Amino acid sequence: MDEQALRIALDTLWVLLTGFLVFFMNLGFAMVESGLCRAKNTVNILAKNFIVFAVSSLAYYLLGFGLMFGNGSPLAGTQGLVAVLGADNSPATGDAYRGVYAALGWTGVPLWAKFFFQLVFCGTAATIVSGAVAERIRFPSFIVFSAIICAVLYPVTGHWIWGGGWLATRGMLDFAGSSVVHSVGGWAALAGIVVLGPRIGRYKPDGSPKPMYGHNMTIATLGVFVLWFGWFGFNPGSTMAVNAAAIAHIAVTTNAAAAAATLTATATAWLLLGKPDLSMILNGCLAGLVAVTAGCAFVSVPSALAIGAAAGIIVVFAVVLFDKLRLDDPVGALSVHLAGGVFGTLAVGLFADKGLAAAIGTDAPALSSGLLLGGGLRQLGAQALGVLCVAVFTFGLALVVWLLIKAVMGVRVPRAEELRGLDIGEHGMEAYSGFQIFTNM
Amino acid sequence: MDEQALRIALDTLWVLLTGFLVFFMNLGFAMVESGLCRAKNTVNILAKNFIVFAVSSLAYYLLGFGLMFGNGSPLAGTQGLVAVLGADNSPATGDAYRGVYAALGWTGVPLWAKFFFQLVFCGTAATIVSGAVAERIRFPSFIVFSAIICAVLYPVTGHWIWGGGWLATRGMLDFAGSSVVHSVGGWAALAGIVVLGPRIGRYKPDGSPKPMYGHNMTIATLGVFVLWFGWFGFNPGSTMAVNAAAIAHIAVTTNAAAAAATLTATATAWLLLGKPDLSMILNGCLAGLVAVTAGCAFVSVPSALAIGAAAGIIVVFAVVLFDKLRLDDPVGALSVHLAGGVFGTLAVGLFADKGLAAAIGTDAPALSSGLLLGGGLRQLGAQALGVLCVAVFTFGLALVVWLLIKAVMGVRVPRAEELRGLDIGEHGMEAYSGFQIFTNM
Amino acid sequence: MDEQALRIALDTLWVLLTGFLVFFMNLGFAMVESGLCRAKNTVNILAKNFIVFAVSSLAYYLLGFGLMFGNGSPLAGTQGLVAVLGADNSPATGDAYRGVYAALGWTGVPLWAKFFFQLVFCGTAATIVSGAVAERIRFPSFIVFSAIICAVLYPVTGHWIWGGGWLATRGMLDFAGSSVVHSVGGWAALAGIVVLGPRIGRYKPDGSPKPMYGHNMTIATLGVFVLWFGWFGFNPGSTMAVNAAAIAHIAVTTNAAAAAATLTATATAWLLLGKPDLSMILNGCLAGLVAVTAGCAFVSVPSALAIGAAAGIIVVFAVVLFDKLRLDDPVGALSVHLAGGVFGTLAVGLFADKGLAAAIGTDAPALSSGLLLGGGLRQLGAQALGVLCVAVFTFGLALVVWLLIKAVMGVRVPRAEELRGLDIGEHGMEAYSGFQIFTNM
């Protein structure tokens, strides 16, 4: 075996193993959502979080991957659309690549490795929505929305940014998906919240929020640890090649942001709310991870600490703000993925360091240094354009989809079912048989 | 360091890391079984699932590995039996290999890497039994059976199929162990169920089943996510070498089957039982994974979807059928591992694609294309022969072993202990101290 | 790309992936501690275990790494102290290395990969303390101690042994950290226990212990499985390079010790206490893992079995002993990490096999074969010296730090808060909202 074959083997191993870690994040999301919601809805939450990846797998295979990475127009892929059946001579790269998925022609791994890695990212975007619409959505309606986000919503903006589409051309950069994955999930979630409305009893007649406590903080914490762990696949794996300097750097920037955000969220909650609320600590960590995702390959470790520190503060205020707006988000998905994703995308325009990126091999022709590193407004402008366009497209289309689902099949469970718990109503079983549980909370 | 050494290093890294993932499946099995059983037996279930891998580690080291992979006869290894002490010049491969574990001479990694990877597979077979005999078996009796399955039962049929034995000679193929691991575990579990009988109160005097609900669906779901994650070690890792095309393909076929099975099991349960039962969704996923395990390296992605889809339907009917036969299987181990394993083994004879296997480097001289791909009955015949022989040998011998254990040390806890819960009786402690739990369910 | 670059890529991939596994051990520690303590303190335990890695990340980055691996004196690093900013031309190795972290010049990976791997080890030492001081420590006081152990306590003895310091010069060897990580955590924990005193009601007026049962054995067992899994990163990863023979060997010795310890702890508890207590089974496994950590690269598989077997017996007696001494250690951290760590460090002096180490490429100039392999007392003497010096330094300094914290900010929550549970007092929330729980246990 020659060096080229060894290189392909090594890169494929990396792409698959980090992809497995990202797959594992499905467990993290399932546990965070279960833990932060009430016991009476747990079976439903678990079922949603479990089936969503099965739905993603099918929808992304049948249509999404082609729409996202197929050759075609700046707006969407138009070749090799269905079932990953387009011509492709991977792992050939660069000029040697011949095929219809040219946007992934830069990475020297087999087509199925590319598909698998992109699939687990798509699954992440879909599962983000789940937490925001929890405790009131009909199970079949959630399944339908999941199929649509994976088949259409996620792939289209993904094409714009990662598929060689028009935002990529305009210089927007999102290394591992603060926008492509997290804010897309966040905007879709926001549309769902708007259409669904808040849970019964969540806001008092005077508009003030009534806290609804999670039933299992142990499981929620487990979930966040799993997500932090999985993020070491998400960000370093997005190199899709074993570039030693890059993956080591990205592992450290990713961790630095998570750590800083954990600490600042703890401090902010302590100061703002009087005590260090555990759910704020956990969401702080996640917000830091989301925020550094766009820039992890372009920023220094001190910059990653700054990005994380800011995200940890932002998330606490975002939770308070969304609650004031009566946007009932049971797990804080908007604060983490939408606020964190938008901030993180913009942060590339503040902290990107072209010299550093060149040194570790992650430079891109479109990359300019950020505003705080003396690069001016060029990168920040491209990032802001990306944020705006993703917002308009994803929120707008998701709103239409949710409204269509509402009209056709209904979106919310009956009032009696919501009060009793969705577990009995949707699934005919309870999560904790034998345990004495108060369900009227 | 030259290319050959790099190749060995790369393959060893792959074998170990995927082996770690398979080890992690022990957590998955422990959580699925705990979650799907009653709270009063949880400590016992955890203890069984924890100690079983320790027992496996010792039994497979002392005897099992040699019996399975040692040179010798078509029926069992006879050389290098004890403590992996046989002569061996691994990582030399092929004609350069000199040693008594020639059946593993095709993979270029050190002997201890081979041992470790095979050990975690053996542990899987042993832990499958645990779920089927839960909530009524004596703790020491389970330990003894675990030692025997790892030292003798699993290695012997493993030798027939993977150790260069007589079934391999007849062309039976089982890439990652639908038969070698899962149906062996399933047959041994069936024998245990027959000898133990159902749990008290499980069937009413008229023979109709009375459901006994799991006490923690969150933990059960966590377990299935961990198993799905671990299966990315189980199937792709079974290449025991970093063949880029093969491991990428296998990751996708594995996931495709899991996803399809999840969806068809959900739909089948919805139609058959009126609601999408979560335990059916979870067991559907597992059945799809078990079923694709034999053929993951030989079938296309659409075929993997078909195999998974069928397995997801089969598992629901199997649960109903085993219940009609009054075979009390608390976690559905028979439906998942036995039904899924048998179907998956036969499915190689239906869906195998020799051209595809050649293209991704997983072809074997014995492989013929399956019946549905125009290859005739040859492969299906070999698979059916394998299924039959594994069934007769494993079920027969396991039955003898269980009956011997029953005669010598007893196999079932006293009635009063079963009603009170095995936790106090076998271990002197409870799982959820402080929680109000109804134990008379 | 040439062979050298491939080698660096492969080694970096290994260091990072095994580092991710070690990071994941934070989840294991969090779940073990939560599960073995009472429900009313769960939020506090989770918050401690979560924030401790964030604190570690910052403290080790700002000071610890430089103190541990910076060039300078035999007592501590004095160059490149702050923020990993010292000169360094990694991944150059050996004579080609130019920089201030020469003690890590033997491993050919980028500096940030070295930092990340060492960071997750530091985090382990810090999190060990958490379990010992659980259910009575003030949250801010724990945070401060965590920062100090990561910034100063852990790095200093780490420098002595791994940083080219004076104990390394005297021939002490600790491959993956039985002393550097585990006994350091154990000594710091012991000092904390001494300063804190036992939980209210833990010892009766006559001095006899009153058991306080863990509230969730499922979660505790999950934690130990995660730790066992993570240890496959901890020990094999400590090669910091893909040496095929070494990593395969270490995976097997690590697992062998865990398995043997599980079995002997089970048997010992069964004989001593009448029943196979699950918490003893779990702590037995952990003690085996801790004990083999120092010698995993230097001992044979049978020796690893012997080390594990001994550790599994030791841990049961240690639990009883520490209880007799009224050292209230809610999770058995002293028995596992301190007793296991000290025994494991000494076991190198008993079981080390220089010939074997040479064969698998883990030999060190300082290594002598152990006493039981005919190597005399030389290695045992070096190990004993190391144990003694780490004990005096870490216990002594940790005691001073704990006493200072006590004087400045207080170390223990008020009596009423301890009785009511720290969750409400420290964090203003409960872990299991809706569940009926008896908190007066």
Image (cartoon, coloured by chain):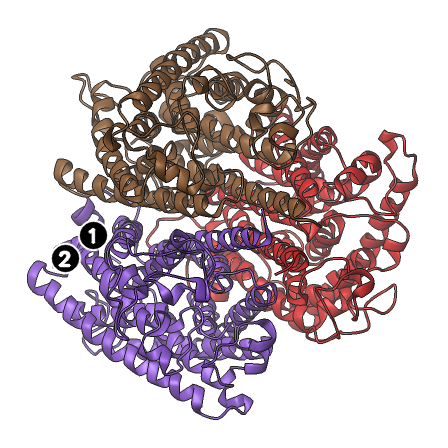
Chain colours: A purple, B brown, C red
The residue positioned farthest toward the left in the image shown: A408
10 Å crowding of disc 2: few (<14), some (14-19), many (20+) = many
Task: Name the residue type under label 1.
Answer: Leu
Q: Which residue is mark 2?
A: A413
Q: Earlier in the sequence, mark 1 or mark 2?
A: 2
Left or right position of B243 against C162: left
Task: Indicate whether A327 appears above or below B181.
Answer: below
Numbered badge on residue A122: none
Q: Is residue A188 left or right of residue C240?
A: left
Q: Secondary structure at mark 2?
A: loop
Give whichever of C201, C123 is nearer the camera. Answer: C123
Q: Write down the chain letter for disc 1.
A: A
Q: Residue at (31%, 19%) from the top-left corner? A: B381
Rendering coords of residue C79 (x, y %): 80, 74
Horizontal side of C362 relative to B136 (left or right) equals right
Asked which secondary structure carries label 1, the reply is helix
Which of the pair A134/C355 is nearer the observer? Answer: C355
Q: Quadrant of residue C284?
A: top right
Residue A330 seen in render: no
Task: Point out residue B405 in the picture as x, y percentages from the top left corner.
Answer: 48, 11
| Res. A422 mark | 1
- Is A219 on the left or on the right of C195, as rendered? left
Type of the residue with mark 2: Val
Do the residues marked 1 and 2 share a common chain? yes
